Image (cartoon, rainbow, N blue to C red):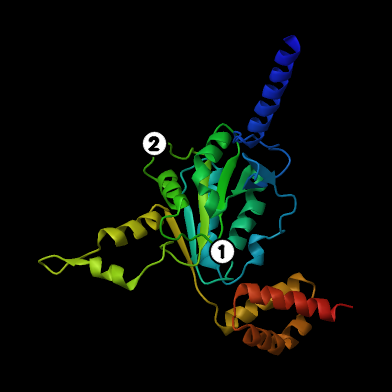
């Protein structure tokens, strides 16, 4: 009888162990002194973790050209944040490859010595924002929750979670947390022609958006600071390419001689973005290096 009871208890313990491995586990605090940036990841086996980013691109604010107004506004907002003053959540929108995410990384490098930290969260994991905010709430550092290339399809749960944490939820973000997000479109949700039919005219001719349009605009409006980025013209593109060539050690006379190649590179890529200028500079400096 005792042998059967022992066997039953052993099997019960094995079953409990298996169940525990698949149950979601609470988010654990990482080694805060081991990094300045982390990625939030859900485990396939259940639970989640903040994984340290060991290698961060050494992007400096001075490296980013032709975005001076946007750079100054983001720098000022981040300066207020790390100084413990009121600051805004930020939405950076506009043309691809114009330096939106690079600007955020550069701010991290600039203000990390003063306690700025960054946690990158994919849009599919934004439903876990309250857990992330909770685990950093008591920390002395300032945390940017960063979501890159943000946009939502209809009905995605992360949309509601982000909207609540930005404004309007009882579980609001703590004073040491801000959200910085980038997107190629300002309203973050797809817009359709049929939705224009929901606009209504008042008797005095004033135009009022319908509920569907209001819902799509409301998320963007919860970001206190909007920074818009626009495609670069030819001169701006060449200035950015020249800056990156200098960054990679190309001599001034060689930079001037590379202008035609830089333009051809952009023509072949169909874009004069800052990203394309950086890619050209890497290629050219690598080919011509002694």
Q: Position of residue 121 (x, y in %)?
A: 57, 50
Left or right for 203, reference 254: left
Rendered-image quadrant of the N terminus: top right
Name the mark nearer the viewer: 1 or 2: 2
Whether residue 274 appears in this view of the structure is yes
Disc 1 residue crowd, few under 14, some 14–19, many 20+, Cα 10 Å:
many
In the image, farthest residue toward the top = 2
Give the residue furthest to the right.
290
What is the C-alpha distance between the residues marked 1 and 2? 30 Å
Nearer the observer, 191 or 235: 191
Q: Considering the numbered disc 2 on the image, is that residue within a helix, a strand or a loop?
A: loop
Residue at 71 percent across and 59 percent down: it is: 57
In this figure, which residue is indicated by the disc labeled 2? 170
When the figure is inspected, residue 235 is found, relative to residue 79, above or below; the finding is below
Choose the circle earlier in sequence order: 1 or 2: 1
* Residue at (61, 79) in percent of width and height: 237
Q: Callout 2: 10 Å neighbours few (<14), some, many (20+)?
A: few
Residue 264, compared with residue 176, is above or below; it is below
Q: Nearer the viewer, residue 262 or 158?
A: 158
From the viewer's side, name the closer residue of 239 and 155: 155
Q: Please, which residue is most extreme toward the front here?
A: 1
Rendered location of residue 58, percent (x, y): 72, 58
Which residue shows up at 64% across the image and 34% down it?
28
Judge whether residue 76 can be spotted in this image: no
SS of the residue at dot 1? helix
248 w.r.t. 120: above or below:
below
**Circle 1 sits on which residue?**
100
- The answer to whether the residue labelled 1 contacts the one labelled 2, judged by CB atoms less than 8 Å apart, is no
Seen at 19% across and 66% down, the residue is 200
Residue 150, horizontal then vertical, whole percent: 51, 59
């Amino acid at each position: 009888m005792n042998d059967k009871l022992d066997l039953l208890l052993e099997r019960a313990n094995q079953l409990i162990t298996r169940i525990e491995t698949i149950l979601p586990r609470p988010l654990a605090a990482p080694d805060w002194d081991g990094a300045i940036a982390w990625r939030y990841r859900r485990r396939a086996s259940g639970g989640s973790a903040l994984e340290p980013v060991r290698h961060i691109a050494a992007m400096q604010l001075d490296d980013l050209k032709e975005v001076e107004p946007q750079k100054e506004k983001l720098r000022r907002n981040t300066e207020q944040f790390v100084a413990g003053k009121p600051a805004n959540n930020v939405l950076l929108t506009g043309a691809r490859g114009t330096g939106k995410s690079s600007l955020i990384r550069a701010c991290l490098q600039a203000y990390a010595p003063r306690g700025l930290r960054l946690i990158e969260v994919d849009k599919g994991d934004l439903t876990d924002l309250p857990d992330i905010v909770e685990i950093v709430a008591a920390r002395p550092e300032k945390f940017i929750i960063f979501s890159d290339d943000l946009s939502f399809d209809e009905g995605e749960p992360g949309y509601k979670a982000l909207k609540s944490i930005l404004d309007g939820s009882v579980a609001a973000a703590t004073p040491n947390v801000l959200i910085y997000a980038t997107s190629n479109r300002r309203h973050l949700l797809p817009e359709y022609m049929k939705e224009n039919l929901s606009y209504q005219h008042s008797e005095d001719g004033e135009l009022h958006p319908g509920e569907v349009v209001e819902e799509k605009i409301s998320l963007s409006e919860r970001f206190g600071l909007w920074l818009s980025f626009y495609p670069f013209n030819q001169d701006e593109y060449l200035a950015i390419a020249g800056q990156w060539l200098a960054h990679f050690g190309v001599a001034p006379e060689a930079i001037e001689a590379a202008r035609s190649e830089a333009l051809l590179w952009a023509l072949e890529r169909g874009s004069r973005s800052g990203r394309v200028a950086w890619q050209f500079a890497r290629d050219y400096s690598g080919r011509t290096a002694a």
